Image: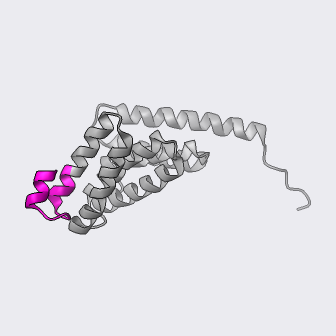
Amino acid sequence: LEIKKVFYPENHEEIAKTLVNFGSCNYGLKNIARAKECWEQALPIIKEKKGEEDPEVARILENLVFVYADSRNTQKERELLEEVVRIKKKHYGAGHFEFAVSQLKLAVVQAKLGELIIALTLATECEQIFMAQPDDGRYLQRCRTLQEKLRTNLSAQVRRDPAPVVTGM
């Protein structure tokens, strides 16, 4: 990085790429704070050079999701994943495999936050995409497992707290 800084200005795309790579290496070494710092430094450079809605922006945001998952900041995970899903939907389209993978991650986070109906809706949309896409079936299976757990939890929730009966109509 220091050598690249000699040849490139601070906001050059090469600096950002190196920061993303350093972030990944640090994350792999469990140096989470340094990984977050690298990715957060790279993000504004990539946004400036490639635009706010470039897939590379989505990839960096997805990396940051790992950081917030590790720190149990589920609300921040959701915020970042919502942005990732929005970018991927715009770039790839709502029926694309990459979009569905990110949306499935968002469904998991919504479930962690107790938003079971939203999570189930997102997972059901993903299932349709995964069924139409050729892959080894891992994501389709993950999707169906999540749906099953969500339905079980929703059913248990309804049994514990049934909807009030409306009278006098």
User: Dividing the image into 4 quarters, which one contains the C terminus?
Assistant: bottom right
- Residue drawn 27% across the image and 65% down it: 47
Q: Relative to 4, is 149 above or below? A: above
Q: Residue 34: which quarter of the image? A: top left
Does residue 101 appear in the picture of this structure? no
- Foreground residue among 20 and 62: 20
- Foreground residue among 165 and 71: 71
In magenta stretch: residue 79: no
Residue 78 x/y as whole percent: 49, 52
Residue 77 x/y as whole percent: 47, 49
Q: Relative to 86, is 29 above or below? A: above
- Residue drawn 62% across the image and 33% down it: 152
For this view, does 164 lie left or right of residue 156? right
- Foreground residue among 119 and 4: 4
Tell me which secondary structure the magenta stretch mostly adopts.
helix
- Residue drawn 25% across the image and 39% down it: 25
- Residue drawn 23% across the image and 51% down it: 19
- Give the colour scheme of this rendering: one colour
Residue 43 x/y as whole percent: 30, 59
For this view, does 114 lie left or right of residue 6? right
**Region of the chain picked out in magenta, as a range:** 1-18
In magenta stretch: residue 12: yes
Q: Residue 12: which quarter of the image? A: bottom left
Query: How many numbered circles are shown?
Result: 0
Q: Relative to 136, is 93 above or below? A: below
Q: Residue furthest right?
A: 168
Residue 121 x/y as whole percent: 53, 49
Q: Residue 111: which quarter of the image? A: top right
For this view, does 105 lie left or right of residue 91? right
Does residue 30 appear in the picture of this structure? yes
Q: Residue furthest left?
A: 7
